[in-house]
Amino acid sequence: MSAPVTTADRETRRGTAYGIGAYSLWGLFPLYFHALAPAGAWEILAHRIVWTLLFCLVLLGIRRDVAWIRPTLGRPRTVGPLAVAGLLIATNWVIYVAAVVSHHVTEASLGYFINPIVTVALGVVVLRERLRPLQWGAVAVGLAGGVYLTVDSGRPPWIALSLAFTFALYGLMKKRIGANLGALHSLTSETVLLAPIAIGVLVWLAVSGRTTFAVDAPLHPTLLAVSGVVTAVPLLLFAAAARRVPLVTVGLLQFITPVLQLLCGVLLLGESMSTSRWIGFAIVWLALALLTLDSVRTARGRARLARAAESATV
């Protein structure tokens, strides 16, 4: 007879489904940005910021959740880190979109494979965290993979490294900001601060005659306008998942995104991958396997300690 399904079990299943949805949507982004041609990376970035802000404001209005805006954006000690976080994620967005429109989706996917390794390395350098042996092994193997890809292609994988470092630094800034802002509040704050830059870019494109917003109406303008929904929905799904599932599960689910990006680039967008490049990816995947093994072992050890502590108090 199977054990009854508890509320915690149902919440975990819901959280896992939300996480799969979020990471799958992020993994399909190359197809969406590819469909935005002939818009360039800067125009897409500007539209993405503006429409994301409008979508967030609509959601906040529906929820009548606007009281936090003035006190949050009125504190310089909060605005500074939020502005830095906003600039980092905007840089990440524009590099990623530029990679997609220039047919470098596979290298962009490598960036998100490398990201967990860079995040661990930043923890050591910036936060003075101590690494466990498997984590050191993952960093060493990941570095070896980066060196191999650099030697193989004759240049460092700049797109992948830029995406990995900007996203890792963005995560570091979010850690510094703390858990005071939820996903919707944080995204709203960041896009509010970025909106003047985005509007300036759109005005410049219009004045210089380089805007594509009116091209192939109504399909192309609609695709640009829904960039707000495309940006916000997976982030909100991720926030819902993170509240319901263990961090190890989130860490495992995150690999859905670069795998789908890689498949989109190779199978659907016609990008080629040489045998030597597959070898470089395999080295990075070995590093990720070490990180994953360390996370699972650590989580199981903590669970055993928690059960032992419960037994001792009974």
Image: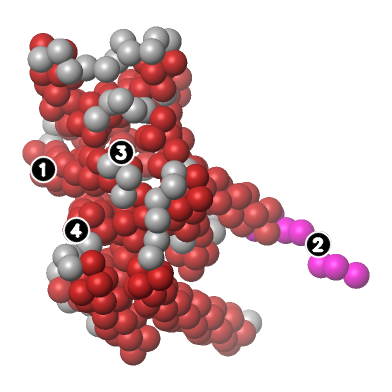
Q: Depth-wise, is mark 4 or mark 2 nearer the camera?
A: 4
Q: Are marks 1 and 3 in contact (CB under 8 Å)?
A: no
Asked if residue 29 is positioned above or below residue 38 in the image, the reply reads below
Task: Indicate the quadrant where residue 74 lies.
Answer: top left
Is residue 275 part of the magenta span, yes or no?
A: no
Would residue 214 be found to the left or right of residue 16 on screen? left
Image depth: mark 2 or mark 3 in front? 3
Earlier in the chain: of badge 2 and badge 3, it is: 2
Provide residue 8's location: percent of width, then percent of height: 65, 58
Residue in front for this viewpoint, 189 or 217: 217
**Residue 175 in view (yes/no):** no
Q: Residue at x 61, y 84 (%)?
A: 311
Classify mark 1: helix, strand or loop.
helix
Task: Name the residue carrying label 2.
Answer: 4
Q: Position of residue 12 (x, y in %)?
A: 61, 57
Q: Amino acid at mark 4?
A: Trp
Above-or-below relation of 151 to 182 = below
Q: Report the mark closest to the observer, 1 or 3.
A: 3
Read off the residue under disc 1. 80
Q: Dividing the picture into quarters, in which one does residue 313 lie? A: bottom right
N-terminal-most mark, 1 or 2:
2
Front-lying residue, 189 or 212? 212
Q: Which residues are magenta?
A: 1-8
